[in-house]
Image (spheres, grey):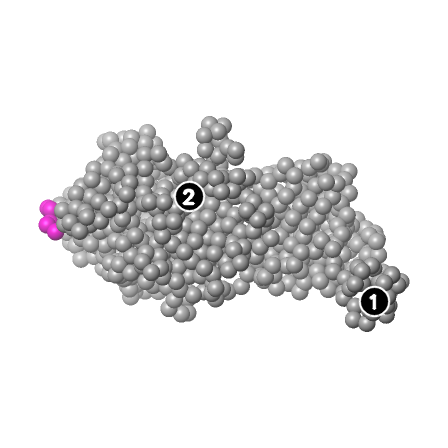
Amino acid sequence: MRTIGVATVLSILLCSIGVAADYLPLKEGNQWTFAMSNGVQTTMKIVGFADVGTVRCAIAETTLGPQKSLEYIAVDPEGVKTYLGKVQGQEFRYDPPVVRIKLPYQEGDSWTAAVSQSGASMTTTFQSIGKERIETPAGAFDCIKVYSITNGVAGQPSVVSISSYADGIGPVRQIIRTSGQQVTATLAALNVQPAQKPQTKPRSQVPKKVPCPKCGAPVDANAKVCPRCGQSMTAPVAAPEPNRPAAPTPAGPLSLEKYQSPDGKVVLYKPKGWNVAQGDMFGPSTYGVTVMEPQENAVVLFITFPVSDQIKDSVVLAAKCIAALRARYPDLVATSVNSTSERERTMANLTLTTPEGEKGAGHGYFFHTSNANSVYLLLAKVKVWNALRPTLTTVAANLAYAPQGVAAVQQEGRPSAQQAPAAAGPAFSLAAMLKRAAQEPGKQVPLQPAALSDQSVSLQIPEGWALEGQRAQYAVVNDTQKRTHGLGSLWLTIMPTQGSVPGVINAPYQAPPQALKLVLESGKSTRDMQVIGECPVLQAVPELSQLIQQMQGQGFQVDARLIQVKLRNVPTGVTCRGLFCVMCSIKSISPVWQVSVQGSWAPDGEYEQWLPLYLRVEKTVQVNQQWMGQELQNQAVRQQQLNRNLQKSIAESNRAFDHYMNTVKDGERSRDYTSHIWSQTTLGQGAWVAQNEGAKVYQTDSWGIEGPDGRIDSKAYNTANFTGENPWTGGQLELVDTRAEYEKYIANR
């Protein structure tokens, strides 16, 4: 069987990004030059016109390095269609033609094209996904975008393409993802004249045929009787177009209804008519949920169970789950297995055959934490996978599970979920303030190298200043007694207790403004903190989005803000101003919470002069990776001790809970089973699943109490805006591809 190389597919896709005459001016001599992210330059040019059957087509020639390919394109009221392609000496004739753009362009439209040539077959699904303004070396353009995914090329992985083009200009940018890699082609130069419309030859001389409803013989559409059997043809049936699959229903707003399980452990939102089942259907000490389409064409499957010595990370979890699934689906294959660097989250493409002999496809997500293992499977029959994937994504984004009951989590979490109101103050942008400071010279003070005594952190500090701290937490101050100028970074894990301990912060969860006040005033040098401005931290420091997303995927409620304050310096009485990035995180039900603070301060009238210097110092901070590795090991030991202490505390305060624990079979298999029983809801994990499926998720809080920002109603469920832009290759994941891992975990046998 012949195969098509990646470069060939790339050239076909690059040629295929034309739309109507306004979006791809089909005039001979028009030319577009693209700069590609891999350093290669490619050119597309209209080199003439030719007939393909009865259709007059423009010939688009694409030059990609030493390769050239030709695409024969024409436009009719249905859209832009490719009738013929010539690549590397091979000719591909498309019958029916491949619709590259559905016209008129409407966001949400989707359609499928199937191509078979010389024994090789491809299936491409297209979707109109909206508009975007794009900056290029050739100018800035308002573009429309089309997403496509090509499957089934023999011996090759799937190819995803996002193409953007502008009215009267043509193709502007294309992003192509395949085999864990991404290539971007951006318009660098163009020479375009108004288009000339290709003409279509009349077809009136070719009589249209329709099948006889009795014998099936082809009969002229205007005939009154079948010449073979004499059947009346007064009500002929229009001939179907061969090989043209029905376009899937465009993804639009879903009508969801709330479902709560009888045992109270699960709350989710599902389309009306979909069926839900839950319980220990996968064995003792497990809890499973299935949300299935009425005709059993698609399903979302959720399973959670305690940790054990046999499952050390999410890669092992994925392998064991895949092996268990193969007992039911022997031909199940897992490909494109990717994991986060710490192996706490893994994902994979899945294909299988149902007991009825139909092909199925989907994605698997596997989470491993110190408390529990969780699995999400999104599966559907191939014929409806693209149409139902947005629905499956939305269901997964909203599945909340808590073994002690979601209502109990909401009740306990309600005080913690309250957002402190933004402080009244001058209307200025903290993000703009940081940007301006990064561009200004500020105070010109010489810097000198310094490191903490335990060598955990090294950095450059102003000459004559002091560096304090340990374990990667530090403060840089101008004077160890006065402390009127400085910057620093620290994080704290706070476990509230009934009794107070001198020198230890003991408080229930606080939102960032209150948490910052707790931290700053826990020492002896700061008092009377007042918030004068704040904003979500991602508005000013977007590079923190990956960290926050990772924490949410682990079940944390995360509240991160950039806060500007005034405060009184106790040793001198001077009023200072400071700017701090404050992140507070907590898992629902758990009393233990974390706060991290990073920021700087100076006397009120001087702060903006010092801020550029502080930013330069922060850029020099380096954490000792050898120290960090040892610290992580030590933290694991301390965490085990904390878990044991927490288990003992719970047992002593709640004998009824001990009785329940004794009734749980195989509960002793998990050292952290107590923590599992008090585990978090899963909304954060589900949102991470949806984001990796290609959805923009506007999240409710982790307890499902408050709806996400931007909603106009009060429904507290995640809003998943499905775009199909799959970010699996966005640099956050690592391919599980070593031979040892393949043989041990992923081999599809």
Eye-nearest disc, 2 or 1: 1
Upstream in the sequence, badge 2 or badge 1? 1
Q: Residue at image x 74%, y 38%?
A: 88
Gap between marks 2 and 1 measured at Cα: 60 Å
Q: Can residue 630 be spotted in the picture? A: yes
Taking the magenta stretch, the answer to whether it contains residue 63 is no
Seen from this angle, which residue lies furthest bottom?
234
Query: Residue, x 85% and y 63% (percent of image)?
Result: 229
Q: Image height check: is 98 above or below 105?
A: above
At label 2, counting other C-alpha atoms closer than 10 Å, the crowd grade (few under 14, some 14-19, many 20 or more) is many
Q: Is residue 535 visible?
A: no
Disc 1 residue type (three-letter): Gln
Vertical relation: 107 (above or below) 618: below
Q: Which secondary structure type mostly characterizes the magenta part of the structure? A: loop
What is the x, y in percent for residue 239?
77, 62
Where are the magenta residues, as a range?
Answer: 496-502
Drawn side of residue 275 relative to residue 38, left or right: left
Q: Nearer the viewer, residue 707 or 132?
A: 707
Q: From the image, tell me which residue sits under label 1.
A: 231
Q: Which mark is residue 593?
A: none
User: Whole-percent x and y of residue 720?
Assistant: 46, 58
Residue 60 at what x, y percent from top left?
A: 75, 49
Question: In the rendered structure, are the residues bearing label 2 and label 1 in contact, judged by CB atoms less than 8 Å apart?
Answer: no
Q: Is residue 337 left or right of residue 61?
A: left
Q: Which residue is mark 2?
A: 366
Instruction: Where is residue 581? Give x, y as percent.
Output: 31, 51
Q: Residues within 10 Å of mark 1 (few under 14, many from 20)?
A: some
Q: Amino acid at mark 2?
A: Phe
Q: Quadrant of residue 37?
A: top right
Task: Place residue 284 in its image quadrant.
Answer: top left
